[in-house]
Amino acid sequence: MKTPIAVAAGDGIGPEIMRATLHVLNAAGAQLEIHDVEIGEKMYLKGFATGMDPKMWDTIRNTKAFLKAPITTPQGGGFKSLNVTVRTTLGLYANVRPCVSYFPFVETKHPEMDVVIVRENEEDLYAGIEYRQSPDVCCSLKLISRPGCEKIVRYAFEYARHHKRKKVTCFTKDNIMKFSDGLFHKVFDEIAQEYPDILNEHWIVDIGAAKLADTPEVFDVVVMPNLYGDILSDVAAQIAGSVGLAGSANIGDRGAMFEAIHGSAPRRAGQNVANPSGLMLAAIQMMVHIGQPDVAERFHNAWLRTLEEGIHTYDIFKEGVSKKKVGTSEFGEAIIKNLGKKPEQLNPVVYEKATAPKIVHRHAPSSANRHLVGLDVYLYHSGPLSDFISNISHINVGPLRLQAVYNRGVKLWPQGQPETFCIEQWRCRFTSGDNMAQVSQNDVIQVLHAFDHVKMDVTKSEFLYTFDGKPAFS
């Protein structure tokens, strides 16, 4: 029985590295029924805003996996990332990126590195919710949810247990973003208690990133929100040897997508020089996922043996280490010649049946008491605070009173400092004062009416809540 998979050749170097990858898969005995999917630049330019004809969703949905080469997203024109669209539409919540050193055959300062980045894949700033609120001010919304955190953190621990890893580390910036990143950290600490056999730790992302770059061997599995995971998985892949050697899996409950982590490199297209290793290693992850671990093992060990023999593409070729510089297709042929062989110095891989961890999602909705206690009103005003404060300081609706005016998070009224640099976005906070008395939605709507009455330009508003009596706003 052949396993149906969707395959997209992509743009730039995509078709070349896909041909090499499929050639080796076929030679390794992969039982695949391939369904081609056209995506990328041509589809964007045909008017499909997501880079794919909507009819292709059924093709992807009705196959077991989606093997995707890199694509080119045209600049400008409001085009949305196809990767983000596929991940969020199909619920591919876990992005798994192994970053492994192949020293001494690939140059690296970290010969012991073997880190797996588990990146949350659906939320954070990648939700793509942005606004231009005035000529000079733009805003992006960072969304972090408890169910999203629970899914990715539990996946990281299950992955570690299943692959006999010893530690899971969480990176966040919750010393600054106390609610969003704070929630991610809180959920991590809660779920870690369910896995007493696995060590756990938390790092603030900036010092964690520095430690990852300097001493990656102290990490094992690292789980983090979407943006940090995207950036640091590229960093980790590069310090392991090369971004061109890294593949990734996008895993959901009802589907999976496998891809190289690098881009389409259009300047290298059509030259038969691109390194197909990232897509090949993604394809190996795919074969494990769809239940053909024997093929994955043969492919992966042959790939490792080829590296050992010094048969390298230009990007990792190094005099004195490499023996032969080859092109994309020649590298694939060299791997085929090594099928059935194992590496002699690098650790050979062993893949067993049913090697994908089974995730059981458990989420108990919060029962906290939520009360509306105020409103933040955002204004577009290009002059100084003194130009408008007298127009709004008298606005009183029910218990709501103006408590403070901020600019870029800095309080300017009352008792601001004259040195503070201001932009044309102002935030005006209305609450009932220190007692945080509950207010009605009609009260906050009347505040907005009052701003309209004094002809102030409101660009945004945000309701303020308490949960179980605690303020839920910065």
Image (tube, grey):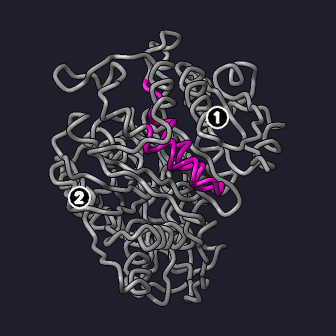
Q: At numbered mark 2, what does the secondary structure look like: helix, strand or loop?
A: helix
Pointer 2 residue: 208
Give the CA distance from mark 2 to mark 1.
41 Å
Q: Measuring from the top left, give residue 376's x and y in whole percent.
A: 48, 63
What is the three-letter code of the residue carrying label 1? Asn
Foreground residue among 276 and 11: 276
For the point 51% across and 41% down, the residue is 299
Residue found farthest to the top: 271
Q: Measuring from the top left, give residue 295's x and y in whole percent.
A: 58, 47
Query: Which region is colored magenta?
Result: 275-302
Q: Measuring from the top left, give residue 165's x and y in whole percent.
A: 36, 69
Q: From the viewer's perspective, tell me whether residue 215 is left or right of residue 222.
A: left
Pointer 1 residue: 26
Q: Give above or below for 458 relative to 222.
A: above
Q: Main secondary structure of the magenta part?
A: helix
One can see residue 455 in this view: no
For the point 31% across and 30% down, the residue is 309
- In the picture, the quarter occupied by the C terminus is bottom left
Q: Give above or below for 442 relative to 337.
A: below
Foreground residue among 458 and 239: 239
Mark 2 touches mark 1? (CB < 8 Å): no
Q: At numbered mark 1, what does the secondary structure look like: helix, strand or loop?
A: helix
One can see residue 297 in this view: yes
